[in-house]
Image: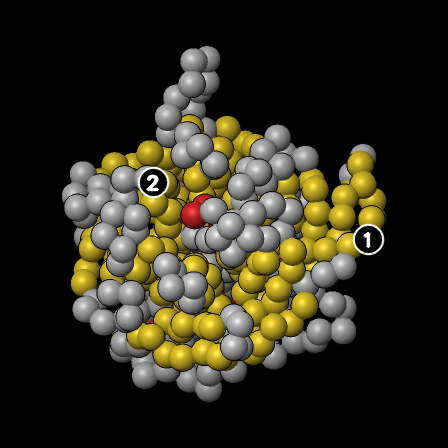
Amino acid sequence: MRRLRNRSLAVLAALGALALTGCGSDRYTPGGTAAHRTVIAHQLMRLTAVHEETGMTLLEGPVFGEDGGLTVVDVTAPAGEPKVLRVDVRKKTVRKVFTDDRGAYTSAQFSPYDGRLYLSDFAHGEIVSLAPDGSDRRTFFTGEVDGARMRPDDIAFDRDGNLYVSDSLGLSEGEKRGRVVRVGRDGEDVTVLADGLAATNGISFDVDYRGLWISELTENRISYLPVVQRAGTTGRHTAVRVDGGIAQTDSIAVDADGNLYQALHGRPAMAVYDRYGERLATVEVPARAGGLESATNVAITPGGTRAYMTVSGPAGGYLYTFDALAEGIRQSNGG
C-alpha cells in the first residue's frame, strides 16, 4: 500500500481504525553507472473514480485467479462501494466482488492451500478470506502479535499456504517498529521473523522460495530476508537502496527470472532490478497522463509477459499495461 501521505492517513482515520475512526515502447536512458531501459506503460482502462466520502481512490493488490480474472482492491472505497473488484482484461470490463462497512483492504492473494482469496485489513489489523466469488467472508487472523496489533499491508504465501505479512506497525508514528510476521496456514503458529523495520510495505518470495524481498517505505530500501538458510548466509540485509526522490517504495513483485518490480508511491512508475540489485528498467506512464500520482503494484500474466500495473491519483484508479522482462509466476502477483 502507499505510503499513506498525510491526506491518506486522514482518510484512513475516517474509515475506521488506526485510525480509521477518527505500473510499450523502450528507449535507453542513463541509470547510475550503466544504461537501463525506460518502458512506457499504456492505459488499459479506468476502474474507479475518486470517492466523495474519502476524497480519493487507491487501487492495490492485483492478483490473477485460476479463472484468468484479475482481482484488485480499492483501499479507500467507502461502505457500499466495491472494495474488491474483478477485471476481465480482455473484455475490459470490471465488476464488484465484495464490499463491507469496515475494512480498508490493502492487498489480495489467493492461497495455494485452500484456493481462497486473502485480504489484509490495514484498518483493523486483520487478515480475512473470501471464496473466489467474494462470498463467505471469514476472519483468518486477528489479535495481537507479541503485544501489538498488526498494521498488515501486503501479504505473500509460501508453497504450503503459510502466510507472510508485511506489518507497517509504527508508520503513523514515524517509528521503526515494522515487522515481518508469519502466520501458519491454519491461522495459528504466529511468529515474528523480523522487526525494527521502517514501515514495512512490499513483500514477495524470490523464485525459489528461499527468501523474502521486503520494501521499507520510509527508508526507500529493499531488504532480503532468508527463510531457508543456505550455508554461510546470515539474516536480513539491505539489498537495494532505491533512489526515489519524493517517491517511496511500495509493493513488490518478482518474475520468472527473479527480477524485482518495485512500485513507487508518489510517482506513477516502477523500478525494475535484477536479483543482484542492478537497475534494469523504469516503467513509466506517458508524461501526458495527468492526475496520476502513484503506481502501487503490478501483476504479470501467469506464463506470459503482459503486466498490469495499478495506478491512482486525482484522475481516478487505472490499469496500465506493459511488457515485463520475463514471464509471470505466482510471485508476480504483487502482495
Report the residue at 80% width, 36% height from top.
Answer: 34
Give the numbered dot on residue 158.
2
Report the residue at 51% width, 50% height from top.
Answer: 303
Residue 56 percent location from the top left of the image: 50, 77
Answer few, some or many: residues within 10 Å of disc 1's Cα (few below 14, many 20 plus, some between 14 and 19): few
> Which residue is disc 1 drawn over?
27
Quadrant hosting residue 125: bottom left
Residue 240 percent location from the top left of the image: 60, 36
Q: CA distance from mark 1 to mark 2?
A: 36 Å
Residue 284 percent location from the top left of the image: 70, 60
Q: Nearer the viewer, residue 83 or 330?
A: 330
Q: Is 187 drawn above or below residue 286 in the view shown?
A: above
Q: Is residue 201 visible?
A: no
Please tell me whether mark 1 sits on a helix, a strand or a loop.
strand
Residue type beneath disc 2: Asp
Residue type beneath disc 1: Arg
Please tell me whether mark 2 sits on a helix, a strand or a loop.
loop
Report the residue at 62% width, 37% height from top.
Answer: 274
